[in-house]
Image (tube, coloured by chain):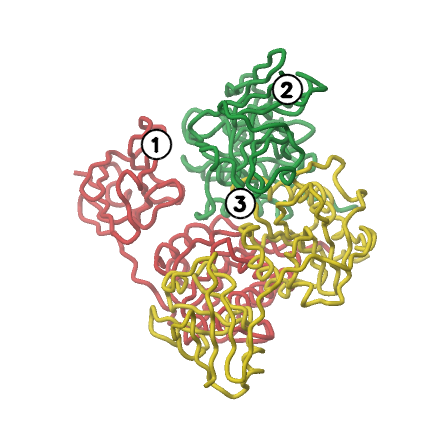
Chain colours: A green, B red, C yellow
Amino acid sequence: MEETRPCVITLSTDFGLEDPYVGVMKGVILGINPRARIVDLTHALSHHRLKEAAFILSSAYAYFPPGTVHLAIVDPGVGGERRILVVHDRQGIWIAPDNGILTLVLRNHPRADIFHLTNRKFFLKEISSTFHGRDIMAPTAAHISLGTPPDALGEKVHDPVLLEFPEPQQTEDRLLGQVLWADHFGNLITNINREMIVRTNPEGRPTVRIDGRTIGRIHSTYSDVPREALLALIGSTGYLEIACNQGRAADRLGYRSDHVMAVEVCFE
Amino acid sequence: MEETRPCVITLSTDFGLEDPYVGVMKGVILGINPRARIVDLTHALSHHRLKEAAFILSSAYAYFPPGTVHLAIVDPGVGGERRILVVHDRQGIWIAPDNGILTLVLRNHPRADIFHLTNRKFFLKEISSTFHGRDIMAPTAAHISLGTPPDALGEKVHDPVLLEFPEPQQTEDRLLGQVLWADHFGNLITNINREMIVRTNPEGRPTVRIDGRTIGRIHSTYSDVPREALLALIGSTGYLEIACNQGRAADRLGYRSDHVMAVEVCFE
Amino acid sequence: MEETRPCVITLSTDFGLEDPYVGVMKGVILGINPRARIVDLTHALSHHRLKEAAFILSSAYAYFPPGTVHLAIVDPGVGGERRILVVHDRQGIWIAPDNGILTLVLRNHPRADIFHLTNRKFFLKEISSTFHGRDIMAPTAAHISLGTPPDALGEKVHDPVLLEFPEPQQTEDRLLGQVLWADHFGNLITNINREMIVRTNPEGRPTVRIDGRTIGRIHSTYSDVPREALLALIGSTGYLEIACNQGRAADRLGYRSDHVMAVEVCFE
């Protein structure tokens, strides 16, 4: 009998890396499935920036093998009334509190099955009221990685919590969007993607502005402009970004995560 | 022949994650046992906060499979007279410098065997005087994960270094303890656990105070109180915590790791 | 048929750990080789400190099994004219942009084969202009870990970019070098190694000075001097370091990464 391919489980949380919480979840997973391959996506999410978390989650999963189990844990409502959801699609399986963090995954996969995780058979025996990542979600992910079908986990759900996401506004000759988050390099990632730009004007060479300031044309890569110059480009996730060649656009433009920065793509 | 279950090795150090030191230890381990599953618990320990390190280590191991090898390296005395210990119990195996970092593990497992790690057969060939994590402890952990019995590693030890841990004081109607550490969320974890509270008064509904300030009753979870309110609860490790719903208790209460905060549980 | 040993792939980047970029590269690798063992060396490199990055890379690989694939990604020129190199030696395989980051690896392995990575067969199907770590280097590393020979990847290269590294100056009774980087503990690692010191004077007991300040003799380990005292010693990488017993030499001596600190080893 051929050995089965080991399953990948990704972890995205707001736990940070200084405490043992992430490691403890891995211990629970490996105790159930010692062959699971666990990958940290990020542990720097925050419940104060839930839309950013939803965007980061939606930008990453396409690069994982089909069948990957994605745990996403930002859970200030732990132990209260909020449900835990399991989302199942051919592309992958997501486990997360029902707080909207899966909004963009669900928008990308409108036919995915959604279950309310209630089957205690797959939980740890003792369940704390403050760490369901360890006691409920990690062991369930491990059991799924061993072949437990998602429909064994609980009843179907048809009303997941969804966040209102700012959709770019399109007029005849322009797109109006906003910055969603700033990455480690200080690149500002917007909610305007390549398809929207092409749909607005398949031939044009638009100008990009941010908070009224003109950045210029859309370039291919950083080194298309002089060192330390700002530029607009389509980033690696397919979304329009404002960057700075060998510098930090976020610092140059005074980005703050609690302030909305308007982005304009003009074909006039 | 059935394939054996791959062994888990956990790493807890004060190395941080910016330098290559943690990765190099993993290289040494995988060179000896390519199937070992290595889990980072934390690399943010400090020799200035050794009791906190001892507590973190003691709170995590129960969630790992039996037989897991735990490396704990906070080692300012490296290359000097201090011994390296191997602690062996049915629950797991610990390898650490003999500086008290295993105090609470040893208290939980009073019948564990303790060995002085001296058998150079399991070390790297060249041993530096400043990185025994890489040259001695990592290769020994890898050999143990392949089945080397701990009693092959050195002589038995009966006098490990133990830290004096502050034990909560119990009177008829109250418990007096203190804060042990603050986690990434700003939760303040104390040295008073659920069993002590029940033993003091199995029926009562006590009031919790910290540095003389009344926090209130012991709640089940964060969302039991309004947003940004302080609360006391039994945390995920079984110990009393002072937290703040969607906020940071450590900041609200002015926690500093070099100042002892007194915690009082009163049944009067 | 015996199962082959799983291959180790190390990652060294300037991506930080807060964004999902490192995790996404791991997803790409595991999608191609689910048995690859991936080890993070560091994600705190910087294109502003490329020599430090070159030194860190050169200090770590000897502790990994032969055949390990090392990805090193500091790539401000991504999408422009710069080449991607694959360096192949009995000790290991390195994949990196051709910007000098492999200078010390190439100096240590002057007979290594160097290839210009151009064979698109091993890349992802869609290649962004800003994330070749994910689209080109990670999938190529995974294919190499499955046995693809490096000479299938592109043409041989004989003119890799090399950084000018400051070589210590040796006179009859002294060595003049400099600090290369400061690690997490505040240890200052210099470009003077044990062999250079022995070659200068095999018998002597030299005095070490830093920026004109006398540190003293070369000791074996931290605890050879009183607590909080500065000392010189040969560090775990074989290079002279200035450290502080249970303290931070970098803070005590005012180290800044943009200022060159001169180090002197005197036998007079």
Give the residue type at disc 3. Answer: Leu
Locate residue C68: give its quadrant: bottom right
Helix, strand or loop at label 2? It is loop
Q: CA distance from mark 1 to mark 3?
A: 27 Å
Residue C71's x, y, as percent? 66, 52
Query: Where does label 2 land, which residue?
Result: A110
Using a 10 Å C-alpha cutoff, classify the residue at mark 2 as few (fewer than 14 neighbours), some (14 to 19) or many (20 or more): few
Q: Quadrant of the C terminus of chain B?
A: top left
Give the residue type at disc 2. Answer: Pro
Say if B260 sits above or below A92 in the image: below
Using a 10 Å C-alpha cutoff, classify the residue at mark 1 as few (fewer than 14 neighbours), some (14 to 19) or many (20 or more): many
Using a 10 Å C-alpha cutoff, classify the residue at mark 3 as few (fewer than 14 neighbours), some (14 to 19) or many (20 or more): many
Query: Where does label 3 land, which residue?
Result: C17
Chain under disc 2: A
Residue A10's x, y, as percent? 59, 39
Query: Where does label 1 land, which residue?
Result: B245
